[in-house]
Amino acid sequence: MHNPRLFLSRVGFFSKSGLLPWYTTNPPDLSQSFWGRAHKGDFTSVTVRKHPSRQQYQKKQRHFSSLEDSWQERLADVVTPLWRLSYEEQLKVKFEAQKKIIQRLESSLRVLHGVSGRVAAPHSEGLHCHLHPIIPSPIINGYRNKSTFSVNRSPDGNPKTVGYYLGTWKGGHWRELTVRTNSQGHTMAIITFHPQGLSQEELCVQKVTLRDFFTKGPGAVCELTSLYFQESTMTRCSHEQSPYQLLFGEPHIFEDLLGLKIRISPDAFFQINTAGAELLYQTIGELSGVDSSTILLDICCGTGVIGLSLAQRASQVLGIELVEQAVEDARWTAAFNGVTNCEFHAGRAEKILPQLLKSQEDEKLTVAVVNPARAGLHYQVVQAIRNCRAIQRLVFVSCKPHGESTRNFIELCCPPNSAKKLLGEPFVLRQAVPVDLFPHTPHCELVLLFTRED
C-alpha cells in the first residue's frame, strides 16, 4: 500500500458500503482488531500480541515503516509503538525514561544552586529525590474510554473513512470523530465538521442525515447514547469557540470513580484509563498529605475529580479550570455526591489564582495539586505558587515531564530571582512516582512531590 494514509474501515456515513471502524472483521495476524465491535458494546478495545524478544522488537522498530509489514503492524507501530514488547518490558522502558528525566532535572538544579545547593538526601538510584517503582495499569488491553479518529479519504477513494493517518493529510468537510465510553457501556460520539462554504440550510441537511444514519440507518448498530456535532474551521476548538450541538441522546456521560459519580461533558477532560486513574488519584492523595487543617488548591482541575476525591480529608477545596463545561461538571458532581466544601472557578489559572491566593488566610496551610496540559503551567501561575508562603507542599502531575513542564520545575526550584518575580523560597523535589495509564505507548503519568526547604 503506497498511499501514506492507512485506515481502519470504511464508514460511509451516507452510503451503504460500510459502518464505523469498530464493526469490522479481524485484521490478519491479530487476535482482535484495534477497535472494538459495536454489537459487543466495546468501542475502544485494543488487543496486541506479544513479541518474542526485545531484539526482534528493536529490529522491527528500525524498519517500522517498511512496506513488508502489514498495514495493521504499521498502524500499531504509530499508535501503540511498544506493542511488540511484553508489558513487563514496557514498564522497564518507561521507568528508565522517567529516571533519565529526573536525572537531567536534578543536574540542571545543581548547576543553578551550585554543587552544595538545596537538594534532598541521595538515594540508592543515584538520585536525590526518591523515585518509586512504576505503578502498572490494572488494565493492559481495552483500557481507553476515549478515542479520536480522523475522517478523510481512504486509499480506495471513499471520502468518509474513519481511521488514523500515516504521513501527511488534507481534509474536506469531515474532520474528526471522537468516541467516549463508560463502564456502563454508554457511548457518546462527537463529530467535527468543517462548514467551508455551506449555507445554514445545507448544514442542517448534513446534520439531519447524520442523525438518521445513527438512529435509523446502518449506524444504529453502534447504539449511541448521544451524538454531538461541532462546526469548526480549526483542528481543535472548545465549546466556547464553537458550541457542541446535541443531535440526539443524553447531554452527558457518567462514570463511577473512587466512590463518586462523575459527570462528563463532551468538552471536558477525563483520564482515558478509568481504572488507572483511580491509582493515579490515590497516589496524589498519599503524596499530598492533605488533612482537616489544609486548603487544597486543585489547579487545572478538569472535572474536579482530584479535589472531590480528597474533599473529605481537606478543610476546603478550591478548583480552577479553563474549560467551562468541565467546571459545570465539577459543580454538578459535588452537588450530586453531597460534597459541600468545594468551590470551582472557570477561567485562566494565571488570572484567577493570584486573586484567589490573596483572599486566603496566610496562616492556613495550603497544598497545591497541578495537572496541566502538555504545554505546562503559565509562568504567572508558577510565580503565584512560588510566591505564596502558605503553599508548603506541591504535587505536580505531568504526562510529558520532558517537555514544557521542565521549565516549570526549574522555576519552582531555582534560587530567588527578582527579574523573573520568583521571590519565594524555592521548592525541593522530594519524590517521584510514575503511574502507567497508557500501556503499549511510551507515555505515562509522572507524579512529583515538591516541598519547601526544611
Image (cartoon, helix red, strand yellow):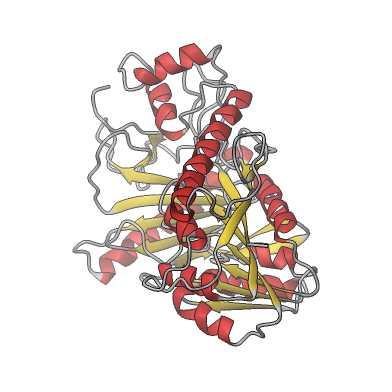
**On screen, 408 above or below 131?**
below
**On screen, 367 above or below 156?**
below
**On screen, 165 above or below 336?**
above
Can residue 162 be seen from the camera position used here?
yes
Name the spot of residue 204 as percent of width and height, x first: 33, 66
Closer to us: 369 or 334: 369
- Left or right: where 243 falls relative to 274: left
Q: Quadrant of the N terminus?
A: top left
Name the spot of residue 159 as percent of width and height, x first: 27, 42
Name the spot of residue 83 as percent of width and height, x first: 51, 26
Q: Tell me which residue sits at (71%, 55%) in the image.
A: 287
Q: Tell me which residue sits at (36%, 19%) in the image.
A: 62
Name the spot of residue 310 as percent of width and height, x first: 74, 65
- Left or right: where 264 falls relative to 34: right
Can residue 224 be seen from the camera position used here?
no
Closer to us: 424 or 359: 424
Closer to us: 239 or 407: 407
Q: Quadrant of the C terminus?
A: bottom right
Q: Tell me which residue sits at (74%, 55%) in the image.
A: 286
Q: Tell me which residue sits at (27%, 35%) in the image.
A: 167
